[in-house]
Amino acid sequence: MANAAGKFGPYGGADTRLLPGRGPTGSELVRSRIALRVRLKAVSPGDRLPDVGVLAEELGISEITVRRALEGMCQDGLLDRRRGRAGGTFVAPDWDTVVALMHDPDEAAALDGFHLLLECGLVAHGAGEVPAGRLDGLRSLVDAMDMVTDPARLVEMETRFHLDLAEALGGAGVREFAADLLGRQCLLRPAPEPDVVRARNRCHADLLTELDRGALGPAVRAVKAHRHARPD
């Protein structure tokens, strides 16, 4: 299965001690990255996950850690374990229903605040120094979101925007850092409504415009406006 969030593994030097409370355990990393894959439609409810050895290599953690994490997710109802020649570990058919029971608004808000801090820092670091053409893919994504009507597809594309933004401004290691934040958020709060995503997409467009101009203040304001964006 293709990796949906860049290198499906460690952060490549990013300091996970900056995460709220502490950095993720190996088990939490497995949970967040599987959740992110579901959000990005790399796997869907009912799909089979890669074997334990493949996941362990991709994540850079031990097979026993991955196995224990998968067992925990099976106990939670997020995954199904099937035996036999066609067996393996599968995303539970009722993934969305189970995730809804795990929503934690307080923890989600803490992660959202940290993600805001991360993106403001990336914008402050990159404003005026983004090479020509580096934001073209993000611009195309913003334009494409304006044409999409499917709610799940809109949420998927917004998630990709934030992953790609982290990589454009901070590199592959920062993308991995953002991937963990976003994956954890997928388990803690419901996906935003389509009208909210469209309002946020206007902030995406504003951000790219200000980054092109090298306007630090307006670019940071666009990041902050995204958090509170609401339909007109």
Image (cartoon, rainbow, N blue to C red):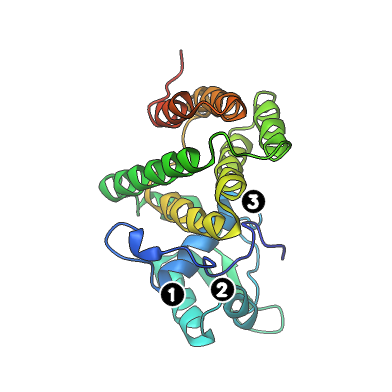
Quadrant where the N terminus is found in the figure: bottom right
Judged left or right of residue 210, residue 220 is: left
Residue 94 visible to an observer of this rendering: no
Residue type beneath disc 2: Leu
* Residue at the far front in the pictured view: 129
* Pointer 1 residue: 26
Residue type beneath disc 1: Gly
Q: Which mark is residue 41?
A: 3
Q: In terms of depth relative to the viewer, which is nearer, 118 or 38?
A: 118
In the image shown, does 179 or 75 lie closer to the viewer?
Answer: 179
Left or right: where does residue 108 sit relative to residue 71? left
Determine the residue positioned at 31% across, 43% down.
Answer: 109
Please state the horizontal and vertical placement of residue 101, each as a whole percent of the image.
35, 52
Closest to the camera, between mark 3 and mark 2, is 2
Coordinates of residue 217 in the picture (x, y in percent): 43, 26
Asked whether disc 1 touches disc 2, contact meaning CB atoms under 8 Å apart, the reply is yes
Q: Where in the figure is residue 189, as x and y percent of width and height? A: 38, 45
* Residues under numbered marks 1 and 3 in contact, where contact means CB atoms less than 8 Å apart: no
- Secondary structure type for disc 1: helix
Residue 230 in picture, x, y percent from top left: 42, 21
Amino acid type, mark 3: Lys
How many marks the image carries: the answer is: 3
Could you tell me if the residues under marks 3 and 2 are in contact, i.e. CB atoms within 8 Å?
Answer: no
The residue positioned 49% from the left and 75% from the top of the image is 70
- Crowding near pointer 3: few (<14 within 10 Å), some, many (20+)? some
Q: Which residue is mark 2?
A: 59
The CA span between labels 1 and 3 is 23 Å
Q: Nearer the viewer, residue 146 or 195?
A: 146
Mark 2, Cα crowd under 10 Å, few <14 / some 14-19 / many 20+, is many
